[in-house]
Image (cartoon, coloured by chain):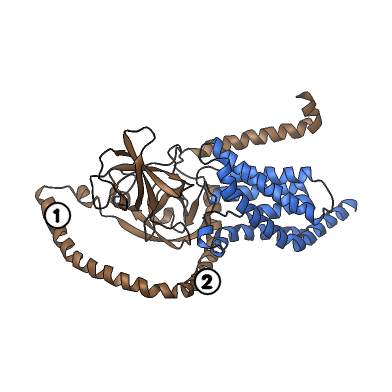
Amino acid sequence: MMMRKQVLLLLLFLLFILEGTIVPWLLPGSWQNILTPNLVFIVLLFVSIYHNRHTALVLGIIFGMLHDVVFYGDMIGVYSLVMGFTTYIMGFIFRIPRAPMPLMMTVVILGSLLFDSMLYAIYRVFSLTQVSYDWNLLHHILPDLVVHFVFGLIIYVPLRKQLEKIARRGKKEKAA
Amino acid sequence: MLKLFKLLGNKRLFVILIALVMFIALMGFTLGPRANLSWPEKFLRDTVGFVQNIFYKPAGYVAGLFKDIGNMRDIYKENEQLKIALAQYTREKANYNFMEEQNKDLQEALHFTEAQKEKYNYSYHIAQVISVNSDPVNRSLVIDLGARDGVKVGQSVISVKGMVGVVSHVSNFTSTVKLITSMDAKDPNSNGIAVTAMNNHQTFGIVESYDEATQMLIMTQIKQGDPIKKGDTIVSLGDTDKYPRGLIIGTVESVQESQFGKTWTAMIKPAAEFQDWKQLFVVFTPEEQK
């Protein structure tokens, strides 16, 4: 039981590292300025739906903070707030045990849209970006959405199995 | 409002509101210029940086290998051009040596102080990129030089082709580079670069923002009648202490009248390619070495 949770944490950390190191090399040059895949976030959406939204909230805040501190450009706390909030809200709205695949993919799409839009909104409020939302939507948010969707499809089967195992064991322990 | 409180449960809404306020306070606090990072931040950055270092380099090599095979055909052509350029450089080197000699003599004759003589004697320290953040607004890189190697906030970072960005935060073993593509006139943390043309020093302007839609830097405050023209190479002027002299920024793509008339605005295509990061150079100015 505990083992699986630690593996999940390690997996998230590994994904975070891959995001900054390997992923840019996998993308063709001209796409590197457009796509900003956030793989950790997608995994957290799965955690939020299939395991527990409170766990997802805490993990979102922790890994968002990690992202903020390591890539500290303008300010700290943006990713932390957005990742925590979005995963929690998504888990809060879709409170369905054993959600089927189309529903999960809807969550990925909505979550991805909400995530990038919130990021844009915060940067806009602090006037760190001047581009219009329409432009941003077309050039960053939608391409991101496609990558997130494909990544969600790839990890759907293995991740759901593992997460449901964690959830089931958690329930058993509570019952005992 | 009261109904809303009841709907969500008083406690939960309260916690959410407090968390929101705290996050906004945190963002506001970290937005302005900060002299030093706190130790938890430094520790986290250095630890993660170490792990990233293990991943980034091998990935770069593998990706580079495939790219090299793809580029095989271009290499022959490139080699030809490089040979021509090299011949030109050797010819100019002789001329340059004479001029430098003469310059030194003149400085001697005019009793320049040691600091004045050393002012433009920059040193370039090679740095390895260890990870990339591709967030469109907060584009930053992490490099493997830190406070231990003498890196300080505000130093310029260049690639082989041109200026890339400015060191924004430093921890012991790593530092973050903020790219010039995130430059913005309204951003409190970014400073404009005073620039001139490489071949004509009468040109003067300030590069202080980047247009995401056209992927060009915007050079403003050019006087009317300035000899600037399309194709000029734009370099930093280095009058202030913020940026060293002679860093290549880019080439002029177009010149038009600015929004308010009176001055001109030029669009500049950045010289550096903001992709496939490998080695970069941190520019150390002599004052900072002491």
In screen coordinates, is B48 left or right of B192?
A: right
Q: Quadrant of residue B1?
A: top right
Q: Pointer 2 indicates a residue of which chain? A: B
Q: Position of residue B280 (x, y in %)?
A: 41, 60
Look at chain A in the picture and name its colour: blue
Mark 2, other Cα within 10 Å: few <14 / some 14–19 / many ≥20? few
Q: Quadrant of residue B73?
A: bottom left
Give the chain ID for the brown colour: B
User: How far apart in space, not on screen, are marks 2 and 1 (Cα)?
Assistant: 47 Å
Q: Position of residue B157 (x, y in %)?
A: 39, 54
The reply to whether label 2 and label 1 mark residues of one chain is yes
Q: Residue at x 80, y 26 (%)?
A: B3
**Residue bearing the label numbered 1:** B103
Task: Check the image and report above or below for B184 versus B100.
Answer: above
Q: Position of residue B36 (x, y in %)?
A: 46, 44
Name the amino acid type tagged 1.
Asn
**Residue bearing the label numbered 2:** B62
Query: How many numbered marks does the figure carry?
Result: 2
- A128 or B234, which lies in front? B234
In screen coordinates, is B47 left or right of B254?
A: right
